[in-house]
C-alpha cells in the first residue's frame, strides 16, 4: 500500500533528470534513493530518511482504518514487500480474495482486521501450508474463499413438514443452516474460517464502531443485514488492544425480546417459532463461536 501522490517540494523535472542520469541507487528495502532530493523513491511515494517520515499518506488508508495512514507494508517490512503500491488482496467477482505479489497471512489479517495467527489458521483451513522455513506457501493469484452466508449447506436435509416450512422463511443460507441445527438439536456450532471472514467483511464494509465500553467484548447488531439478521441478530465480537476482531460468539434460540429490539416482523416470527417448538417439542438453543 503506497500513495500515488508526492510531497509538493519534490520536483518531477529533477526526478526525471535524475533517473535518466542513472543517479538512483538502491538502498533502504531495495528501493532507489534520489541523489538530488535525498529521498527514497518507493514507486508511488517518497520517504525522508533524515526525518524518518513518509512525505504523503497512503491512498488506501480509508480502506484500512486499523493501520496508520503513513504505514509501510502493514507495519511488517521484515516479512512483507510492497512492489507497486497497490492495495492488499483484490476481491474477485464472487467476493473471494485474490493474492497479489507479496500478499500472505499478515496482509490478509490487515485486510480483514484480525490477527496474523487467525489469518494463518484460516489459510491453512483452505489448504495453504507453512513450509520448513516458516514461510506460507502462497503465491500471486491464489484465492482465499469467503463464505458470505448466502448459500445453504443443509437445504437437502428433511426437517419434516413444519421444519421445512420454517426453514424456507429463514431468508438466507446461513439462517437456514442455523435453523436446521436448532430444529434437529445439533448442539453448539464452531464457525469455519471462511464464515468468520464473511462476518469480518460485513463489519468492515459497514464501518461498525469497534470501541468497547469495558473489557474486550462488544455487542454488534446484524439486524441491518439481509443475510445475517435472522442468523445472528445481535452477537458479541472480541476485540484486542489494536481494535482487531479476534473472536465471535452468539446464542441461537427463539426467546422473545421486548418489542423494539428487533423489527416487528422478526419479533413476531421469533415468538411464533418459540410457540411451535414447544408444541412440537422440536428445537434446542445452542452457541455459535469462532474460534
Image (cartoon, helix red, strand yellow):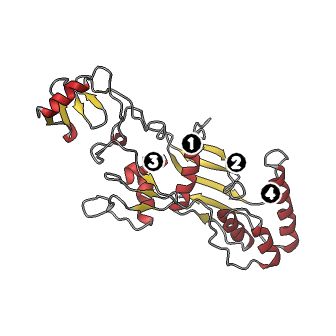
Give the image location of residue 10, x and y in percent.
27, 23
**Label 4 sits on residue:** 255
Distance Cα–Cα, label 1 vs label 2: 23 Å
Q: Is residue 133 left or right of residue 189?
A: left
For marks 4 and 2, give the one nearer the viewer: 2
Sequence-first tag of 1 and 2? 1
Along the line of sight, the residue nearer the viewer: 107 or 38: 38
Kindly indicate the quadrant of the structure image that contains residue 32. Answer: top left
For marks 1 and 3, give the one nearer the viewer: 3
For marks 1 and 2, give the one nearer the viewer: 2
Sequence-first tag of 1 and 3? 3
**Label 1 sits on residue:** 216
Q: Quadrant of the N terminus?
A: top left
For marks 4 and 3, give the one nearer the viewer: 3
Can you tell which mark lies on residue 111?
A: 3
**Label 2 sits on residue:** 224
Sequence-first tag of 3 and 2? 3
Secondary structure state at the residue bearing disc 2: loop
Distance Cα–Cα, label 4 vs label 2: 20 Å
Above or below 131: residue 229:
above
Distance Cα–Cα, label 1 vs label 3: 21 Å
Seen at 11% across and 34% down, the residue is: 22
Amino acid at each position: 500500500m503506497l500513495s500515488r501522490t508526492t510531497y509538493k517540494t519534490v520536483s518531477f523535472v529533477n526526478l526525471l533528470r535524475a533517473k535518466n542520469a542513472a543517479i538512483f541507487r538502491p538502498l533502504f528495502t531495495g528501493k532507489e534513493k534520489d541523489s538530488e532530493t535525498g529521498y527514497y523513491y518507493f514507486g508511488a511515494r517518497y520517504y525522508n530518511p533524515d526525518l524518518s517520515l513518509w512525505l504523503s499518506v497512503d491512498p488506501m488508508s480509508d480502506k484500512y482504518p486499523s493501520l496508520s495512514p503513513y504505514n509501510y507494508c502493514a507495519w511488517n517490512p521484515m516479512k512483507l514487500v510492497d512492489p507497486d503500491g497497490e492495495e492488499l488482496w483484490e476481491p474477485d467477482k464472487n467476493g473471494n480474495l485474490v493474492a497479489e505479489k507479496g500478499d500472505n497471512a499478515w496482509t490478509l489479517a490487515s485486510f480483514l482486521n484480525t490477527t496474523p495467527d487467525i489469518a494463518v489458521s484460516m489459510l491453512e483451513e483452505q489448504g495453504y501450508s507453512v513450509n520448513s522455513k516458516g514461510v506460507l506457501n502462497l503465491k500471486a493469484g491464489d484465492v482465499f474463499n469467503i463464505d458470505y452466508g448466502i448459500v445453504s449447506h443443509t437445504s437437502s436435509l428433511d426437517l419434516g413438514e413444519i421444519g421445512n416450512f420454517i426453514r424456507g422463511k429463514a431468508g438466507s443460507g446461513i439462517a437456514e443452516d442455523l435453523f436446521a441445527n436448532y430444529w434437529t438439536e445439533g448442539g453448539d456450532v464452531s464457525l469455519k474460517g471462511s464464515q468468520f471472514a464473511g462476518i469480518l467483511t460485513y463489519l468492515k464494509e459497514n464501518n461498525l464502531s469497534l470501541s468497547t465500553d469495558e473489557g474486550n467484548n462488544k455487542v454488534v447488531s446484524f439486524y441491518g443485514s439481509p443475510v445475517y439478521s435472522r442468523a445472528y441478530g445481535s452477537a458479541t465480537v472480541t476485540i484486542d488492544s489494536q481494535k482487531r476482531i479476534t473472536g465471535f460468539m452468539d446464542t441461537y434460540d427463539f426467546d422473545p425480546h421486548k418489542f423494539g429490539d428487533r423489527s416487528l416482523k422478526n419479533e413476531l416470527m421469533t415468538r411464533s417459532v418459540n410457540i411451535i417448538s414447544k408444541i412440537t417439542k422440536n428445537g434446542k438453543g445452542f452457541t455459535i463461536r469462532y474460534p
